[in-house]
Amino acid sequence: HLLSDRIQTQPLELTLPDAPSALETALSKEHILFINSTREKITTDKTNHAESKLVGDIVEALIKMNGSDFAPHKKIGVITPFRNQRGMIRQELLERNIPFAQDILIDTVESFQGSEKDHIIISFSVNDPSQLKLITEWNENHTVDRKLNVALTRAKKQLIMLGNEAVLSHEKVYGNLIEYCRSNDQYINPQKQ
């Protein structure tokens, strides 16, 4: 698989804390990870609170496991398709007093084109299948989702995807991606832990 070949050539170099959480354990060993998020009641603001909290948990864990000289604003990037979700994630990081929270790149896939970070977190933040058309951009043959392709190739060392499996699976390319993660033990369902 092209994606895993590219990312897995970079060592993660993460130090597990004593009594690590399931999230920390997965982050320490998996280069690609899909985390199933809670489906929220559909609103017009295109946000997912559970995913913004998960982003906060992931950023805190990466900081903790990377050591004191880790610069999150230089190493972590967050991709999300919706401006309101971007604002919610930024607020979450600021409320947690994450170092350099204001400088961590949180933006749409279009803004990430041409740049890379060691750790990329994608918050799909879709709560209803009708929102899938807002996050996809197909080529002429309907074989490649350009936005997903760009998002998946921004990570140098680790790609962490957050989304609701039931919603995302309505689009075959996302269903296949999630199934790939599940079959390679790169899938976490926090609701079942």
Image (spheres, rainbow, N blue to C red):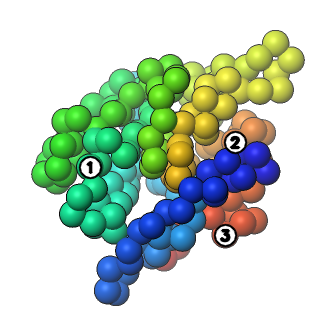
According to the image, label 2 marks what residue?
Answer: 174
Q: Considering depth in this image, is 85 or 23 the residue closer to the camera?
A: 23
> What residue is shown at x 82% (from left), y 12% (from top)?
140
Whichever of callouts 2 and 1 sits on the residue coming sooner in the sequence is 1
Whole-number angstrom distance, CA of label 3 to CA of label 2: 17 Å
Q: Nearer the viewer, mark 3 or mark 1?
A: 1
Q: Is residue 143 left or right of residue 99?
A: right
Tag 1, which secondary structure? loop
Residue at image position (28%, 56%) is 70
Query: Are there few (<14), some (14-19), or many (20+) residues within 10 Å of tag 2?
Result: some
Image quarter of residue 173: top right
Q: Is residue 88 left or right of residue 177?
A: left
**Crowd rating for badge 1 (residues with CA inside 10 Å; few <14, some 14–19, many 20+):** some
Q: Distance between the residues labelled 2 and 1?
A: 31 Å
Residue 33 in sight from this viewpoint: no
Q: Nearer the viewer, mark 2 or mark 1?
A: 1
55 sits left or right of 193 in the view: left
The residue mark sitting in front, 3 or 2, is 3
Do labels 2 and 1 touch, CB within 8 Å? no
Q: Is residue 21 left or right of residue 88?
A: right
Q: Where is residue 93 in the image (x, y as percent from the top left)?
A: 22, 46
The residue under label 3 is 185
Tags 3 and 1 touching, CB below 8 Å: no
Mark 3 secondary-structure assignment: loop
Q: Residues within 10 Å of mark 3 (few under 14, many from 20)?
A: some
Classify residue 74 by image quadrant.
Answer: top left
Q: Is mark 2 on a helix, strand or loop?
A: helix
Residue ID for mark 1: 71
> Considering only order in the chain, which callout, 1 or 3, is on the residue closer to the N terminus?
1
Name which residue type carries label 2. Answer: Tyr
Residue sitting nearer the eye, 46 or 122: 122
